[in-house]
Image (cartoon, helix red, strand yellow):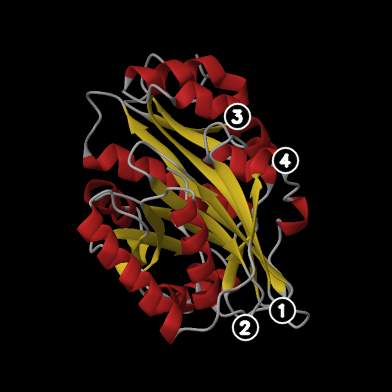
Amino acid sequence: MIGAVRERKALAFVRVNPLEHEEELKRFMVANGYVTFPDFFDRGYPSAVRDGAATWVALDDERKVRLSITCFPHTMALGERRLLVGMLGNLMADEGVRTFFPAVALVRRLLADVRAEGRLDLVCTDGTAQAAAIFKGAGMRVAGYLERFVFPVRERRLHVDAAIRAYQVWRRIRGPRLAPIAAHVAAEFDAAPFDAPIGISHRLRPHHSFDVCRRRLPGYPGTNDHWFTFPCGERYGSTTALVRWPDEDGLAVLHAIRRPSGAVLTPIVNALVRALRKRGAQRLQVCTLRESVFARELIEAGFIPRGDPMPILVHPLSLAGENAVRAVADWEITSFDMER
C-alpha cells in the first residue's frame, strides 16, 4: 500500500512516484477496467518518470488507492524557446467514488502542486464530456476542440473506389505537384535526428522522442509503423511523417508530422495518399485542433472533418503558457501528443 498520510480522513490526496507503487497501481487500474495498463506502464512509465512524470492518488482510510491521475511532461517548441507541457492521462476512479467532487479535488491538488513546483508552463488534457466537467470544475478551461480529419484512400466497392480515385486526381491537378517521398519501416529507421522541430516557428510544435513514440504506440517500432520522408529542397529541408497502418479496417493513422516552417502541406499529403493507396490502405486519418491553421491546411489538402470534436482543456502556469493558449490557432499538434 502507498505510504502513510499525516491525517486520517475520508480521502487523502498524495503525489507519488508511480515506479515505487507499481504493483498497487497496476492492480487498481486493471480492477477498474483498464486491462492493458500493465503493458502501458512497463513500456512508458520508467522513461516518463525520468522526464519528471508523477502520479496523484486519493487514498481512503485504509490507505487504498481510490482515484488516480498522472501528469506526463511533453517538450514543445514555440518561437525560440521550449515549453514544458504537462499532459494529463490515466484518470481513473474506483467504484464508489466515481462522483464529481472527489475527482475535482484530486485534479485541484495536482494543479496546485505543479504550480508550486514551477517547472511546467502549461497543463493540458482532452476528455469526454464527463471528464471535461471534472477538469473545468478544477479550474481548467476549454482552449479548443480535437477533431478527426479523414482522407479517403481506397474502397473495396469498385464504383466508390472510382469516385475516390477521381477525387484524388482532382486534388493533385488543382494543387502543387507531388512531393518526393520515401517510406521506411520504423524498426529499420533512425528517427532520432527528427525528434525536434526544424528551425524557429511561431507555431507550437512538439518534440517526438523514441520514448514518447513507444509510450503512445503499443509495440512501437513494429511492422505497422512507418516513417515517410519528403525532401523539400535546400530552403526547407526534409519533412517526416509517422504513420501506423494497417488495422483490420485498412485505416492508416497519421500520428506525427515534422515539417520546416513554410513547407506546404498539400503536395506532402498528395504524395502520402498515393503511397498509401499502393500499399492497400483504405483511409488516412489525423486528429488535431479544429480551430488551428493546421486543421485548415488539412482541409485545403483534401481531408474531410468528421464532426466529432473532443474538448482540449488547459491551465497555464507561466506567462509563456498563457501566451501559448492565446495562440491556440498556431498549435500544430495531433492526438498523438496527448495522453489517454
Q: Amino acid at mark 2?
A: Gly
Please tell me the numbered disc located at residue 188.
4
Image depth: mark 3 or mark 1 in front:
1
Q: Is residue 224 left or right of residue 154?
A: right
Please tell me the numbered disc located at residue 296.
none
Sequence order check, earlier mark of 2 and 4: 4
Determine whether label 3 and label 4 are within 8 Å by CB. no
Sequence order check, earlier mark of 1 and 4: 4
Q: Position of residue 91 (x, y in %)?
A: 38, 38
Task: Tell me the residue that label 1 is attached to.
Answer: 236
Sequence order check, earlier mark of 3 and 4: 3
Q: CA distance from mark 3 to mark 4?
A: 20 Å
Task: Tell me the residue that label 3 is attached to.
Answer: 43
Residue 179 sits in quarter: bottom right
- Mark 1 Cα within 10 Å, few/some/many (few <14, many 20+)? some
Q: Position of residue 308 (x, y in %)?
A: 24, 59
Per the image, label 4 sits on a secondary structure element best described as: helix
Q: CA distance from mark 2 to mark 4?
A: 29 Å
Q: Is residue 215 above or below residue 143?
A: above
Task: Tell me the residue that label 2 is attached to.
Answer: 262
Q: Amino acid at mark 4?
A: Glu
Residue at 61 percent across and 79 percent down: it is 263
Q: Is residue 218 above or below residue 234?
A: above
Sequence order check, earlier mark of 2 and 3: 3
Residue at 53 percent across and 76 percent down: it is 267
Q: Amino acid at mark 1?
A: Tyr
